[in-house]
Amino acid sequence: MNQIINIFKREITSYFSTPVAYVFIVIFLILAGAFTFYLGGFYERGQADLLAFFNFHPWLYLFLVPAISMRLWAEERKSGTVELLMTLPVTMIQAVMGKFLAAWAFCGIALALTFPIWISVNYLGEPDNGVIFASYLGSLLMAGGFLAIGSCISAMTRNQVVAFILTVVVCFGFLLSGIPMVLDAFRGWLPQILVDAVASLSFMTHFNAISKGVLDLRDLLFFVMVIGFWLAANAIVIDLKKAD
Amino acid sequence: MIEIKNLTKSFGSLTAVNNLSFSIPEGQILGFLGPNGAGKSTTMKMIAGFLTPTSGSVSVCGFDVESQAIEAKRCIGYLPEGAPGYGEMTPLQFLNFIADVRELSGSHRKEQLDTVVGRLHLDQVLHQSIDTLSKGYRRRVGLAQALLHDPKVLILDEPTDGLDPNQKHEVRELIGHLARDKIVIVSTHILEEVDAVCDRAIIIARGKVLADATPAELEAKSQYHNAVKLAIEELDAAVEAVSRIPEVMKVEVERESGRLIAIPRAGHNPFTAITKVVQENGWSVDELSMERGRLDEVFRQITQGSETGEVRS
């Protein structure tokens, strides 16, 4: 546990010692705001909730989360520090967890900084704060899922741009797998059970369920398992790719 | 104590390290030599616990590097090739991170930090990001990181590569002044380095040990071992007289510098005989010296011999 904290601390300090962190947070906040007010029609809807805000999170994360995750391991491999890290008395799990949790906490900070919108909606009306809390939780879990995918893909390459693009593509697949248009394409030739399996992998479906305020254990578990699966794959990829 | 048994590492069809076995007792400074691509780095990466051996075993301080990885890593300090570091951190932040991970605390931590910073003269760059440091300083930060927890075993992959002569000298001094009970493994392709700091040299090529001896023993394998260098005005006469000495196998002449080099027959020392000849003829000598042997020649002989052998088989 201590080692996870040590690695976590190093990672998070390194985010804030480069402009990356500030650029990311500023862009995230501007886009989140712009989407909510212009595309989401926050005022026009005339309802005291944050649906207009949370609806765009999957799309924001699709491009912003890979921008955080792309450097996680690709940079370590490119600069050779992975060799240093793996020869310190740290286990693979501690290293993977420490780095992942740092990136996740960073997303959490960016997300927490959207609090003015929560204040606004509370000022304007009487929203259901339980639903808002659930949505924040769902949003954070979804970001974690994207990050775990990105972390694993980042370990496959030394090149951050490649890591970014591949992560966007894979995350896009996970986002859209629940949309009728995608499912229709499968329905023609796959048995229903597999179509359902594809549908159940959709981040969007699970996120929408949580952000309606229904905290179903299955939706929470889904994200936890996605994170667990991709981080386990991450550890295996690092191990396999150490030599090159 | 490090024990390496039948260590083998293959990458696909390429065997980088082939059935390597040796042990290193406490207090030994081992020079690891070999041409590029000989398997030096791969071997060191396996000892340090970064790469997993295809077969065979490595034990460090009594811990198997695979099954007791954490314990083994605790007693190793490792400088990877190229001395990688986290560029956005300052050396102070970086060393603090290493101290955290190495679980140093309290006054011991402060003491160790002060010691390595002092020893490697890092005081001036402590607050500058590692990215902006010169190659020499970066290498020193890497060394500081490896030395920080005062490890029993120190593995340095090309610690002086890319340093200027002064810095090279400093690093060698540092290695030489480490406590006597440590094991140090240094890989290099600079042969003078082996001569300057190592108690033992292992030459490998194509993943196999070709020679395992003290630097002096290696020098003795050179045909220049005990060769006599003589600079003299009467060069031609001297060449003739010296070639007649029974201990001398061959005489090489360097016209530009007005010097001759008398190469002895194996196991003989022609020094006395040559001084006698010089005295008898009453020549005035500009320079008279005896060579210990040329490591680079031995190195070439050993490593290239193996390559032609390989082709034949």
Image (spheres, rainbow, N blue to C red):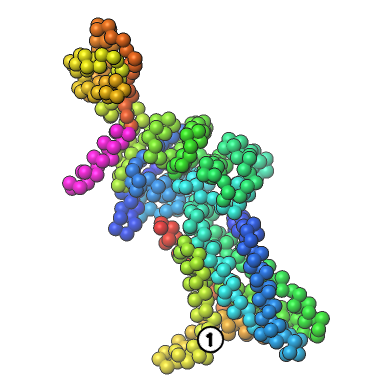
Seen from the viewer's position, the closer of residues B168 and B157 is: B168
Residue B31 visible in the displayed image: yes
Q: Is residue A40 left or right of residue B88?
A: right
Circle 1: residue type: Gly
Q: Is residue B176 above or below residue B269?
A: below
Residue B292 part of the magenta segment: no
Which residue, as the protein is rendered here, is positioned at the far front? B256
User: x%, y% of residue A73?
Assistant: 51, 61
When asked about the image quadrant of residue B232, the answer is top left
Q: Is residue A135 above or below residue A103?
A: below
User: x%, y% of residue A107?
Assistant: 64, 69
Q: Is residue B133 left or right of residue A134?
A: left
Q: Is residue B105 above or below residue A30?
A: above
What span is colored magenta in the figure? Answer: B296-313
Give the quadrant of the C terminus of chain A: bottom left
* Residue at 56%, 78% in the rendered image: A222
Residue B6 visible in the displayed image: no
The residue under label 1 is A178
Which secondary structure, mark 1?
loop
* Residue at 71%, 83% in the rendered image: A37
When asked about the image quadrant of residue B305, the answer is top left
User: x%, y% of residue B135?
Assistant: 51, 44
User: Residue under mark 1: which chain is it in?
Assistant: A
* Residue at 59%, 51% in the rendered image: B101
* Residue at 67%, 69% in the rendered image: A26
- Decide whether the magenta segment is chiefly helix, strand or loop: helix
Q: Is residue B278 above or below residue B298?
A: above
